[in-house]
Amino acid sequence: MLVSGGGAAMAKTKASTVDIRDISPNPVVVKGDGETEAFFKVDASSDVDNVKLSVTPLGVRTLRAQEAKQLESWRFSVPFNSDDAEGKWRATAQAFKNGQVVATDEAVFSVEIQDEKAETRIARFSADPYKVRKGKTVWVSGRLQVDDEGWEGVRGEKVNVYYRANGSSGWKWVSSATTKWGGKFTATTRAWRSGTYKAVYDGNDELQGTESRTDYVRVVSWGH
């Protein structure tokens, strides 16, 4: 890509210079289908009447032109999106005087493309019954959902169930389940001590991870 700027005032100097002083942000991070604008600050000696800036990916052949624009005082902006090459890029600044290149400077920067994952949630989470005899079964259930222009169930994903006993600061894995139609899942575990349960989904390449609310179960002995 190529961008040109207006002329600077003519002045007598020993040698014409051009310098890429700053690239921001670096790395340039593009998320999902969004666009990230990178800014390039270039300094040039006063005798230079024009500056051109080009940016190209290293080790990648590309014929696609990109939009670029020149801002004030030899400052340039370039937009990047997910169609651009990920990795190292080279910025090249050329200073012109009377139509001839009189100075050149280069700088390397990075472009990172990050896939945007869809938001998820665990809805209707419950651990039942609320009061259970020691050694009996606790049923844990809920629905894993994804935000796809509205909350929809996610099928075929693994959800883990964790338990924290009264007086304990740590969570312990106790069971897991695979989501069915509508994102519904059901898991079971044995009740030995009163405590709190939660469900955790770790996410995948397309979906964010999430945790459910917590639910408390009271365990009583057979004599009560």
Image (cartoon, helix red, strand yellow):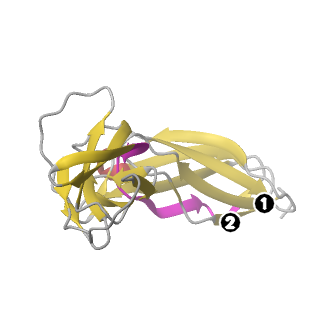
Name the amino acid type tagged 1. Answer: Ser
Q: How many marks?
A: 2
N-terminal-most mark, 1 or 2: 1
Image position, residue 34 (x, y; %): 27, 58
Choose between 112 and 96: the one closer to the eye. Answer: 96
Q: Is residue 155 visible?
A: no
Crowd rating for badge 2 (residues with CA inside 10 Å; few <14, some 14–19, many 20+): many
Choose between 174 and 73: the one closer to the eye. Answer: 73
Q: Of helix, strand and loop, which mostly describes the magenta segment?
A: strand
Choose between 68 and 176: the one closer to the eye. Answer: 68
103 horizontally vs 22: left or right: left
Residue 46, numbered label: none
Range of magenta residues:
106-131
Image position, residue 153 (x, y; %): 31, 54
Image position, residue 168 (x, y; %): 85, 57
- Write the residue at 87% across / 62% down: 167
121 horizontally vs 5: left or right: right
Q: Can residue 137 be seen in this view?
A: yes
79 horizontally vs 176: left or right: left
Callout 2: SS: strand
Q: Do the residues labelled 1 and 2 touch (CB within 8 Å)?
A: yes
Callout 1: SS: loop
Identify the image quadrant of the C terminus: bottom right
Q: Is residue 153 above or below residue 64?
A: below
Q: Mark 1 points at which residue?
A: 194
Q: Mark 2 points at which residue?
A: 216
36 horizontally vs 61: left or right: right
Q: Determine if the magenta segment contains residue 116.
A: yes
- Write the residue at 31% across / 25% down: 59
